[in-house]
Amino acid sequence: MTVEFAKLHGAGNDYIAIDGRGIDRDWGALSREMSLLAFGVGSDGIVLVQDSDVAQIRMKVYNPDGSEAEMSGNGIRLFSKFVIDRKIVIPVEDILTVETGGGVRTVWPTMAGEKMISAKVAMGVPTFVPAEIPVDTAKTGNLEIIKNYPIQVGGHDLKITCLAVGNPHAVVVMDEPVEGFPLVEVGPYVENHELFPNRINFEIVNVINRSKIRARIFERGAGETMSSGTGSTASATAARSHGLVDDTVDVIVDGGELRISWDETGEAFLEGPAVEVFTGVWPD
């Protein structure tokens, strides 16, 4: 059967949105096909609409390699625009609740007429507990937190800080300019490192000042991306945990800029744009 879809992006992080309610198929295989640049639509994966018993709607996220991700910060904004603009779901008191693999998330949409143009997302409480990320601490001497932990990968000595914001992240705050770092070459080594039983997302960060950082992001199952909501959140919260930035931080990524707020005690919040690029029909 043919599949109707919309292509959207948030600060350059692009996803294909599909209403999958009542449809039974191999969505991972479809994500592999549609995400290809030359032979498909080209994307960082699929955000799929499904019914939920615990929230207003459910989002499933599939990476370009067909694997399923727990959560996507940019993806949930694009997902929210897709379902709100098409009136699949009507926000209640200007709030949308979305079930994800990382838990139920709250979205506050910003509207221009009947179209959503941006949103603020509650990203959950970041956790630095190794078992919750997860990290195999048997290989780290059973450390209670993985902060500035030294690893050597691809000929590079890195100090990683590990946390989860719905999905797992390893962040390196470095003095070396991130533009010159060989992220595409080193990223797979970190993603598939023996410390991470479920693989991991990898971010490299420069602190510009206490309210601004620069980040490049290597996503598990996708490679380097122009932007990532969870990656930006992890970058900002890792920097905050080291005392390098204030509670609210603008994260400059290759595709634009996202704003992260975290006071080190509760939930982190992500704010950014949501843009629909085009719609289409995928033939089968």
Image (tube, helix red, strand yellow):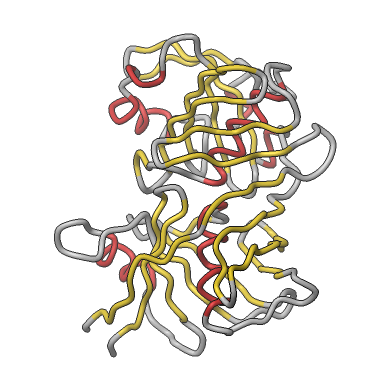
Rendering coords of residue 178 (x, y %) = 41, 20
Residue at 64% over, 40% down: 164
Residue lying at the far front of the rendered structure? 113
- Number of numbered labels in the structure image: 0
Rendering coords of residue 184 (x, y %) = 30, 31
Q: Quadrant of the N terminus?
A: bottom left
Residue at 80% over, 32% down: 264
Q: Relative to the observer, which residue lies in front, 129 or 96?
A: 96
Q: Quadrant of the C terminus?
A: bottom left
Q: Relative to the observer, which residue lies in front, 184 or 212?
A: 212
The reply, left or right, for residue 194 in relation to residue 236 is: left
Residue 161 against residue 55 in the figure, above or below: above
The reply, left or right, for residue 260 in relation to residue 175 is: right
Quarter of the figure with residue 176: top left
Q: Relative to the observer, which residue lies in front, 32 or 108?
A: 108
The reply, left or right, for residue 48 in relation to residue 278 is: right
Quarter of the figure with residue 113: bottom right
Residue at 32% over, 83% down: 3
Rendering coords of residue 278 (x, y %) = 33, 70
Residue lying at the far left of the rendered structure? 38
Quarter of the figure with residue 263: top right
Residue 73 against residue 23 in the figure, above or below: above
Residue at 58% over, 58% down: 118
Q: Relative to the observer, which residue lies in front, 53 or 120?
A: 120
Rendering coords of residue 225 (x, y %) = 38, 42
The reply, left or right, for residue 64 in relation to residue 94 is: left
